Amino acid sequence: MQLKRVVVTGLGALTPIGNNPDEYWQGLSTGVSGAAPITRFDAEKFKTRFACEIKNYDPLDHFDRKEARKMDPFTQYAHIVAEQAVQDSGIDLDKIDVDRAGVIWGAGIGGLKTFQDEVMNFAAGDGTPKYNPFFIPKMIADIAPGMISIKYGFRGPNFTTVSACASGTNALLDSFNYIRLGMADMFISGGSEAAVTESGVGGFNAMKALSERNDSPETASRPFDKDRDGFVLGEGAACLILEELEHAKARGAKIYAELIGGGMSADAHHMTAPHPEGIGATNVMKNAIKDANISPEEVDYINVHGTSTPLGDLSESSAIKNVFGAHAYDLNISSTKSMTGHLLGAAGAIEAAACIMAIQNQVAPPTINHFTDDEAFDAKLNFTFNKAQNRDIKVALSNTFGFGGHNTSIIFRKFEG
Amino acid sequence: MSDIAQKVKSIIIDKLGVEESEVNAEASFTNDLGADSLDTVELIMEFEKEFNISIPDDQAENIGTVGQAITYLEENAK
């Protein structure tokens, strides 16, 4: 069967460096760090006391009190970016077939704050269960797409993908597949996460996954630097409107880019450590390139997973060399997590948005915070250190990898009819 | 209005996000004030917390309006 083509017709973003796509791109292209001391809770006793939080966020700017109270922050963020993207797409909700319009969302954890607050409340009592009736429906990771479908009346496929830090990309790839198989016309798709809580920071600290550079939060996320010491936890969301090409054309939609392929693989190696030779990461990029029916030489820009952990950055750079050979040196490579921090289940969504805006603007955003070369990396690779670079970008690839050994890659191409 | 009635009304206004003018004695939580079944459970829990009592399920089922809540709590609150 002939697969349908899928295009991006709307964008939404709520990130630590910008509360809409324009602000987000402004931050990305000028190399702004979103890291700062934690304000969400008193972090004095924590090993890590900073994170990349959303700035100037008041739920009452977006929801009435009753709505806000019934939604965990990860669902609030999802609603905000979905609304931005729907508005941006110019779609007339009265003119689409809502049975063929779905919502597929990525969340690595879901309502962590809700879970934590309810359990702490129980623990503070005398053992009598006094759980709020909204505890479960607020906390479950699939509530975000559920609530979005209620708002827009979309009755097509609806669920959440959970693959830790690859969740957002898995959501986009599922949406892509349903559309190209002809099973739906469009999706509101993306990811959100809100894990800057005591249990989130404490839990990742216990794994020694987080940077502990408390004296300089804004330089803590330093992927591919010799002194990288872990990732910086971020929060937020991004949303893409993915639409079948003819459906988009028929309504005269503006088209940001075409989603041309994706790949998935597993490391089958360790709970949290990446495969040392990057087998999963190598396979996933190869799978995506094959799926997109392009040659590796056509890729111009890679938005890497690059979380700023000692092992992860190494295995990913080895994988890039495995996949691209000599062309690896012609690529612009960058980790935008150097600016946004790591948004876990939303990472794939905000980084897909970064790739799309990189194609639009013909600019590769930088890997900021590069101070000291690490001889473990091939010095001929161009990590786009510290400053954005102008570049003719036709094809951009984004990698995301999750604890559990889940790997995903997604490829966008400049839309040329 | 008794203190209890005032407290009950402010809980309802807060939890259901409604205006004070809507919260009259006859107003039904579900039919008039937009509550769903989960909102109703949450309201009962708030009454229990505020008035430090435990409302058995079979009695909670009979609290469907603002007036019924006020009457029950005036009779049972410690």
Image (cartoon, rainbow, N blue to C red):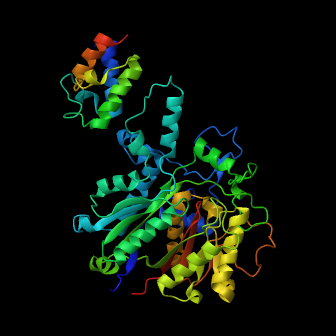
Q: Give the image quarter of residue A363.
A: bottom right
Q: Give the image quarter of residue A386.
A: bottom right
Give the image location of residue A206, x and y in percent.
68, 47
| Left or right of A232, for residue B75 | left
Which quarter of the rendering shows the C terminus of chain A? bottom left
Establish if A256 lies above or below A163. below
* Residue drawn at (49%, 41%) of the image: A115
User: From where the camera sits, is residue B2 visible?
Assistant: no
| Left or right of A342, for residue A130 | left
Nearer the observer, A245 or A273: A273
* Residue drawn at (33%, 86%) of the image: A2
Which quarter of the rendering shows the N terminus of chain A? bottom left
| Left or right of B74, for residue A200 | right
Nearer the observer, A240 or A99: A99
* Residue drawn at (21%, 22%) of the image: B25
Establish if A238 lies above or below B38. below
Give the image location of residue A67, x and y in percent.
36, 43
The total of numbered circles placed on residues is: 0
Give the image location of residue A17, x and y in percent.
57, 58
| Left or right of A55, for residue B2 | left
Establish if A43 lies above or below A408. above
Give the image location of residue A65, x and y in percent.
38, 39
User: From where the camera sits, is residue A182 visible?
Assistant: yes
